[in-house]
Image (cartoon, rainbow, N blue to C red):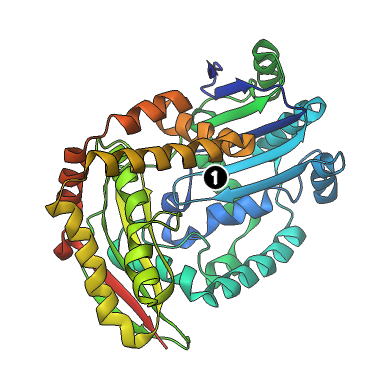
């Protein structure tokens, strides 16, 4: 289903043919906020914003108009371990998307005037984020649990750092890190694969391969904590979290299924039923599983009334302990597997999501699983796997707690 090719300079291509009139394309780069030095905190995200502000061939307006002017959409995002630029366009305009990706990745000049304007935009983004305690609490939790490790600092960086970034610093960071062997071109479109390879050779093939300076050779050692911070909020915001499997760990699939059962997006998640529906203690309660290359985190977030805080914490641990103490029945397991497979299939039915998903998979595993392969992995999980995984990771003593009180 997926086709692969690697250029001589190490750049990888992953592709799926689609009969749609719309093409989805992007470039994943294996560089994120964890690859920054202390004086560079926020740099990867700053580049994500600034990469569209001018190249040796185009001004900022021409970059934005290149895709948007033909009805497409150009965008980008940054995580702790990767950066992605991507576009949606008519199939007939895929070539201009690929050419533009190469132009901004290898020919951006970062004019001072444009950078100064973008600094103001990012500082306002930081201000907006700091006004959202339900989002800020995740970053602050990671700062505590990974204290002293590159995964600790937040993606946006600090206002001070952002204000002091120079074009020279930005270009140096890109030169050191944005190398072809760390890039994957990902495409879902109505095009012959041979033609796509020729386009990638044309736009990317001339750039030499050289080793990135990024080093990720020290896995984080999680710190354990229980902290309460007073903030001017109407709700009490509670975040519990513990270490979880990394992306290469054999427990990853079982933990993904377990997380979906406990607090996934469906209204029938165990935490939603046990705490919101049964007692009305909160409006939002959810869990998330975030695997990194050498670590992973499992979170449970709840926005609650302060009077219910201790009761909610008790109910959460009670639900988690249940999975360690009791094996799921065959019917419960089948229902949970069917639900996750359905959610996954619906999400990947959107070609934009699929393009991003396979690009990230290729970046990390050098291949992407089909829906059929992912379904088989989920169906291979047993009730014993779920119980063992819960006992291994979800012991109450392994959880750290961060609370925002109003």
Left or right: 142 as drawn, with respect to 351? left
Residue at horizontal 20%, vertical 66%?
Answer: 318
Residue 14 higher or lower than 331, as above or below: above
The residue identified by callout 1 is: 83
Residue 191 visible: yes
Q: Residues within 10 Å of mark 1 (few under 14, many from 20)?
A: many
Left or right: 220 as drawn, with respect to 39? left
Left or right: 395 as drawn, with respect to 242? left
Residue 30 visible: no
Q: Toward the viewer: 98 or 280? A: 280
Residue 311 higher or lower than 298, as above or below: below
Give coordinates of residue 30: x percent, y percent: 48, 39
Image quadrant containing the C terminus: bottom left
Q: Outermost residue, top direction? A: 194
Q: Toward the viewer: 73 or 169? A: 73
Q: Secondary structure at mark 1?
A: strand
Residue at horizontal 30%, vertical 48%?
Answer: 258
Residue 142 in which image quadrant: bottom left
Residue 69 higher or lower than 198, as above or below: below
Residue at horizontal 37%, vertical 49%?
Answer: 260
Give coordinates of residue 214: x percent, y percent: 42, 42
Left or right: 181 as drawn, with respect to 324? right
Q: Toward the viewer: 312 or 290? A: 312
Give coordinates of residue 151: x percent, y percent: 37, 56
């Amino acid at each position: 289903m997926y086709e692969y090719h690697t250029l001589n300079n190490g750049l990888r291509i992953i592709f799926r043919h689609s009969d749609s009139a719309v093409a989805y394309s992007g470039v994943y780069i294996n560089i994120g906020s964890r690859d920054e030095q202390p004086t560079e905190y926020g740099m990867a995200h700053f580049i994500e914003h600034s990469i569209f502000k001018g190249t040796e061939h185009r001004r900022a307006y021409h970059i934005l108009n290149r895709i948007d002017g033909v009805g497409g959409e150009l965008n980008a995002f940054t995580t702790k371990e990767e950066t992605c630029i991507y576009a949606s366009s008519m199939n007939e305009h895929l070539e201009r998307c690929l050419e533009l990706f190469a132009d901004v990745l290898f020919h951006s000049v970062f004019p001072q005037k444009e950078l100064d304007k973008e600094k103001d935009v990012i500082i306002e983004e930081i201000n907006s984020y700091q006004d959202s305690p339900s989002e800020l609490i995740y970053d602050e939790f990671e700062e505590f649990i990974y204290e002293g490790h590159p995964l600790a600092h937040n993606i946006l960086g600090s206002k001070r750092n952002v204000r002091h970034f120079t074009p020279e610093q930005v270009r140096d960071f890109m030169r050191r890190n944005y190398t072809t062997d760390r890039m994957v071109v990902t495409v879902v479109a109505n095009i012959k694969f041979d033609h796509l390879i020729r386009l990638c050779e044309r736009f990317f093939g001339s750039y030499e391969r050289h080793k990135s300076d990024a080093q990720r050779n020290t896995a984080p050692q999680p710190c354990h904590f229980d902290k309460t911070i007073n903030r001017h909020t109407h709700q009490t915001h509670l975040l519990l979290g513990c270490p979880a499997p990394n992306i290469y760990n054999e427990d990853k699939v079982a933990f993904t299924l377990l997380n979906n059962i406990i607090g996934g997006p469906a209204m029938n998640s165990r935490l939603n039923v046990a705490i919101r529906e049964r007692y009305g203690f909160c409006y939002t309660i959810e869990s998330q599983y975030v695997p990194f290359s050498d670590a992973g985190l499992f979170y449970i977030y709840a926005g609650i009334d302060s009077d219910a805080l201790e009761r909610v914490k008790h109910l959460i641990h009670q639900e988690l302990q249940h999975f360690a103490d009791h094996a799921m029945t065959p019917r419960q397991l089948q229902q949970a597997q069917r639900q996750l497979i359905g959610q996954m299939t619906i999400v990947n039915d959107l070609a934009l999501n699929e393009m991003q998903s396979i690009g990230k998979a290729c970046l990390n595993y050098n291949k992407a699983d089909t829906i059929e392969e992912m379904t088989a992995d989920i169906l291979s999980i047993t009730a014993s796997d779920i119980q063992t995984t819960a006992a291994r990771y979800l012991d109450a003593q392994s959880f750290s707690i961060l609370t925002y009180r109003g």
